[in-house]
Image: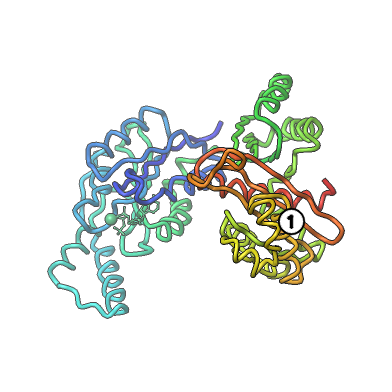
Amino acid sequence: VSSRAGIVVTGTEVLTGRVSDRNGPWLAEQLRLLGVDVAQVIVVGDRRADLAAALSFLARSNVDLVVTSGGLGPTADDLTAEVVAEFQHRLMEVDEALHVRIAGIVQRLSAGRGWTLDPEATAHSNRKQANVPAGAHALEPVGTAPGLVVPPPPGSSSPLIVVLPGPPRELQPMWLSAVSDPLVTDALAGREEIRQRTIRLWGTPESELAAVLRENESRFTELEITTCLREGELEIVTRYHPQAENEYQDMHATIGQAFAATAFSLDGRTIDEIVADALTESASTIATAESCTGGLLASRLSAQPGASAYLLGGLVTYANSAKIDLAEVPAELIGQFGAVSEEVATAMADGARNRFGAEIGIGISGVAGPTGGTEAKPVGLVQLCLSRKGQTVAQRVQLPGDRIDVRTRAVMIAMHMIRQAFNGG
Ligand code: ATP
Ligand code: MG
């Protein structure tokens, strides 16, 4: 058996989507690494009643632990500590030693920034942050707010609540210290490791994968398998306890055999890592000429640490004049075949290769939309080409979705073309 946890992310800015949640996913992964099964992640605004309702809901879902993020600051909308205290039937009291430490931190911080603080407001906010539920353990502040570990009232079976600040750079180190708090260790006692492995396919429809999994269902009873289509890649994520390792190896082999041509990652590596490794190991160099993707491919290649070993550079040749002047595309080709054509994409790839002196060149030209489509060349049509000495591989695709989708998907396809160039595929 494993322990179960719930996560409550607070913050109206997260609820409304102004800030995208980085704490829920991070905490879920940390809990998984500890062998804790996450039952729910709930996002609530900075409202007392909604936070209380989320806590009650999780308590009824039989979780052993709840982790909250946000609402620990000194302002009026920061009400997590109070709501959690009330939920656990604990009164708030000032922790005098903590109060002194917070005052010290605030003073050092403001001196460092050259601020002059209003003494009365500062005293009030320091006191608020030093106010902790009776019987709770305070976690040392990373910023100015301490975290809290708040046990349920004696005799109650409700969960232990760990209260963490909202800013991810404060929450992350504080979580790492929270896990060694004796109340937390206790609540998570008896847990068992949960392994998580990922396999990725390129070019297999979800239905075919589903069919193979269905056929083998009776052999994989201890595996929790989820599949998800992401930017054209089919991702299979499997979670299991260590005793099911043999079953997982069996499933891994089954998928590897059934989809030998499309299972490009059987070891969890992402396409970005695979491409980086292939370019590095073969000591190849690469350069790009991009039109509709506007440099996204070069950006993606450069995002990997160590990219300087293989990425020489990229051209953003959006206008035809740029294709001609920078990527050395003959003007006649554009006139005869149009900018979105195999001929022009190939000339762009060759031009990039030539201008940068790279071994591999990639050219991408397409209609990202929403305007600019014609009957012959509709929105979503993208022409890609990979060229190297004595070889060109062209791919023409009709991509669904809006401008963002078309551009990201085109880059993904280019990444797979690079990978396939090393597989002889
Ligand atoms: P503070 O003392 O800074 O007020 P806090 O614990 O009260 O800390 P919040 O007020 O909820 O935290 O959030 C502070 C900032 O941290 C937000 O403006 C936001 O930028 C960031 N933040 C909060 N929650 C999240 C989240 N779930 N994901 C990403 N960023 C977040
Ligand atoms: Mg705040």
Residue 139 image-quadrant placement: bottom left
Residue 263 in picture, x, y percent from top left: 75, 39
Position of 297 with respect to 342 (left or right) is left
Q: Residue at x 81, y 60 (%)?
A: 388
Mark 1: secondary structure? helix
Quadrant containing ligand 2 reads bottom left
Toward the viewer: 181 or 83? 83
Image side of residue 413 versus residue 159, left or right = right
Please determine whether, in this image, residue 95 is positioned above or below residue 50.
Answer: below
Q: Where's residue 358, x and y in %?
A: 76, 68
Q: Position of residue 230 (x, y in %)?
A: 59, 40
Q: Is residue 289 above or below residue 399?
A: below
Res 325 seen here = yes
Q: Quadrant of the C terminus?
A: top right
Q: Which quarter shows the N terminus?
A: top right
Seen in the picture, residue 302 relative to 405 is either above or below; the reply is below
Compare residues 174 and 20 and report the one nearer the observer. Answer: 20
Q: Residues within 10 Å of mark 1 (few under 14, many from 20)?
A: many
181 or 425, which is in the foreground? 425
Where in the figure is residue 419, as x and y percent of width and height?
75, 51
The residue that appears at 36% across and 49% down in the rendered structure is 69
User: What number of labels is visible?
Assistant: 1
* Colouring mode (rainbow / by chain / secondary structure / one colour): rainbow
**Foreground of the two, 158 or 239:** 239
At 23% from the left and 59% from the top, the residue drawn is 74
Amino acid carrying label 1: it is: Thr
Residue identified by numbered label 1: 346
Q: Is residue 193 visible?
A: no
Beta carbon of the mark 1 residue lies under 8 A of ligand 1: no
Which residue is at 31% across, 48% downward?
Answer: 11
Q: Is residue 99 left or right of residue 183?
A: left
